[in-house]
Amino acid sequence: MFFEDFPVGKSGISVGKTISLTDIELYNEMAGWPDSTVSGKKAAPAMLVTMISAGLMTRQGFYEGTLMGILGNTWRYKAPVVAGDTLKIKYSVSKASLTKKGDKGIIEFSIKTYNQKNEIVAECEMKAMMRARGNG
Amino acid sequence: MNNEGESIQVGAVFEVPEQVFSERDLILGILWEGDAQLHTNVPGMEKTSFGTTIVHGNSVTSKVIGRLFKTHFKSAEEITVSEIDVAYLGAVHVGDTIQGKFQVEDLESPAGRPKKLSMTFEVTKNGQQVVSKGSMRIEAAGNR
């Protein structure tokens, strides 16, 4: 999908992804974050929650191939996430601006990440640069 | 709370050691974030201004913050991250060397409770180009 396919207010919900102990172990192998537990369960590092949430956005299937890059994001972490939790995201388009050249645009997504109890565990504003239709 | 001999105070700067971004790091990013086009489609990305596949910005941020915790906060008993803000300014590729520099902007030390820190950071690749800038808020409980 192209920039024009993301009008302000467009929204959606992802499928769920359960965070396994292996996800956390592989993340800590890559990134070296310290181990943490919550109520005896291994906690997912904040940036792993970010990456999984970003992946749930990608799996919407609407911007792979036309996404030119993520320009930035701001994540606020509201509640712990532990191994066994299942995350899903709800997104909406909060702003969309075509560049002067008209061949691409910047879309601002508002994203909320929920656990299986429907509690918000993280929220984000993310800026993505997308190709505009007709750019070839 | 942080390493012996270092003091946490407003204005303190923490530089973290260089890390080479590996193909394994890229593949792990794919596992969680996906996006085969930007990250694994070599011929497709050769046609773009990037010239080749790029790595996930969130993986880069993860690695520099992880290295900060490991090198400068290793005696902290618990670190809780409440906010991370990042602007991505340039692409990183497999094989690039990344390095992070953090500065303490604000510090609260309530008695008997974890310290609250606000830090800014920037990430440089290959010792030259700043590829991201950001800020984060953490709480660190420690024994110092």
Image (spheres, coloured by chain):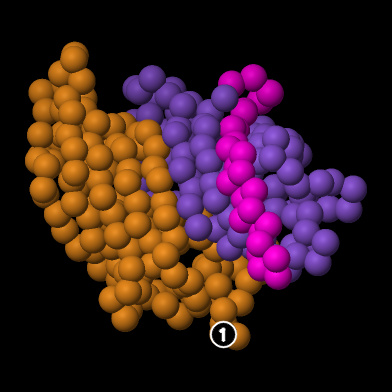
Chain colours: A orange, B purple
Q: Nearer the viewer, residue B109 or A113?
A: B109
Q: Residue furthest right?
A: B5
Q: Which residues are magenta?
A: B105-129
For residue B11, which quarter of the picture?
Answer: top right
Can residue B63 be seen in the rendering of this structure?
Answer: no
Can residue A12 be seen in the rendering of this structure?
Answer: yes
Residue at position x 10%, y 34% in the image: A4
The quarter of the rendered structure image containing the N terminus of chain B is bottom right
Relative horizontal placement of residue A124, taking residue B59 as reference (left or right): left
The quarter of the rendered structure image containing the C terminus of chain B is bottom right
Residue at position x 53%, y 68% in the image: A44
Relative horizontal placement of residue A2, taking residue A74 as reference (left or right): left
Q: Chain of mark 1?
A: A
Q: Residue furthest top?
A: A101
Residue at position x 50%, y 76% in the image: A82
Residue at position x 11%, y 42% in the image: A8
Q: Is residue A67 above or below residue A53?
A: above
- Number of on-image labels: 1
For residue A129, which quarter of the picture?
Answer: top left
Relative horizontal placement of residue B61, taking residue A35 as reference (left or right): left
Q: Position of residue B40 (x, y in %)?
A: 42, 41
On whether residue B106 falls in the magenta region, the answer is yes
Q: Is residue B83 above or below residue A100?
A: below
Q: Is residue A41 above or below residue B112?
A: below
Q: Which residue is mark 1?
A: A39
On whether residue A104 falls in the magenta region, the answer is no
Q: Position of residue B62 (x, y in %)?
A: 57, 49
For residue A114, which quarter of the picture?
Answer: bottom left
Q: Position of residue B6 (x, y in %)?
A: 84, 46
The kind of secondary structure element at disc 1 is: loop
Relative horizontal placement of residue A132, taking residue B54 as reference (left or right): left
Three-letter residue code for mark 1: Ser
